[in-house]
Image (cartoon, helix red, strand yellow):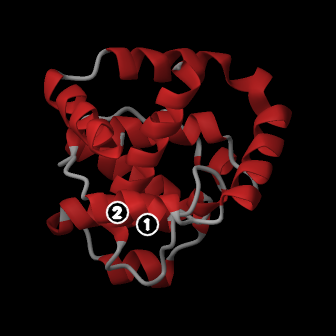
């Protein structure tokens, strides 16, 4: 049951990200690994909810992946109170750590509006699962032992979700069953 719950939670989180970044043609988030390495997904997620914080076109056109990641993490720290839990250099790789990305995106989910539509959830369910799972499992095996503290913190974040977040996730899950 716990594995099923995690899968559904990841689907809801991915649905939320895709729904939030839908209007950013440079961004196509299909997983919690390689889709985040260029920094555009983090910035688009922030910009979609708080567009007054920065100019999107400047981020897209004038910065390297490490600079874009640093920009997103600094914006989240300064304006949303989310600590800089990831190093841009660790994310700006071909295969960033899935659990670390999940942990950080969950932190964003906790402070930004969380409404997820059924359409967005269905869209995630239609993504090609085989290649996504195989690649993410490969990444997880090679990096798992380096991130035990981050995984513990991710579990803490999930367990300390506000009742509003838990209610949103519970409602979305009940619609899927």
Looking at the rendered structure, the secondary structure element under dot 2 is: helix
Q: Are marks 2 and 1 in contact (CB under 8 Å)?
A: yes
What residue would you read off at disc 1?
123
Viewer-proximal residue among 134 and 88: 134
Q: For the point 27% across and 44% down, which residue is it?
A: 175
Q: For the point 53% across and 19% down, which residue is it?
A: 2
Q: CA distance from mark 2 to mark 1?
A: 5 Å
How packed mark 1 is, by other alpha carbons closer than 10 Å (few <14, some 14-19, many 20 or more), is: some
Viewer-proximal residue among 31 and 24: 31
The C terminus is located in which quarter? top left
Q: For the point 59% across and 62% down, which residue is it?
A: 35
Can I make out residue 115 in this image?
yes
Label of residue 113 in the image: none
- Image location of residue 139, percent across then percent down: 78, 43
Residue 156, image quadrant: top left
Viewer-proximal residue among 101 and 90: 101
Label of residue 120 in the image: 2
Image: 147 above or below 171 = above
In the rendered structure, the answer to whether residue 79 lies left or right of residue 150 reads: left
Looking at the rendered structure, the secondary structure element under dot 1 is: helix
């Amino acid at each position: 049951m716990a594995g099923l719950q995690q899968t559904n939670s990841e689907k809801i989180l991915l649905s939320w990200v895709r729904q939030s970044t839908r209007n950013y043609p440079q961004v196509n988030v299909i997983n919690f690994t390689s889709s985040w390495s260029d920094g555009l997904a983090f910035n688009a997620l922030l910009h979609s909810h708080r567009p007054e914080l920065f100019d999107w076109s400047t981020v897209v056109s004038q910065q390297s992946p490490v600079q874009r990641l640093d920009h997103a993490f600094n914006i989240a720290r300064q304006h949303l109170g989310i600590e800089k839990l990831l190093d841009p250099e660790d994310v700006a790789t071909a295969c960033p750590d899935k659990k670390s990305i999940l942990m950080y995106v969950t932190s964003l989910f906790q402070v930004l509006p969380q409404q997820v539509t059924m359409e967005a959830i269905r869209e995630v369910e239609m993504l090609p699962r085989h290649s996504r799972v195989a690649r993410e499992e490969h990444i997880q095996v090679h990096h798992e032992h380096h991130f035990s503290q981050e995984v513990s913190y991710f579990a803490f974040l999930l367990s300390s979700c506000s009742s509003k977040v838990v209610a949103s996730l519970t409602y979305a899950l009940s619609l899927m069953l």
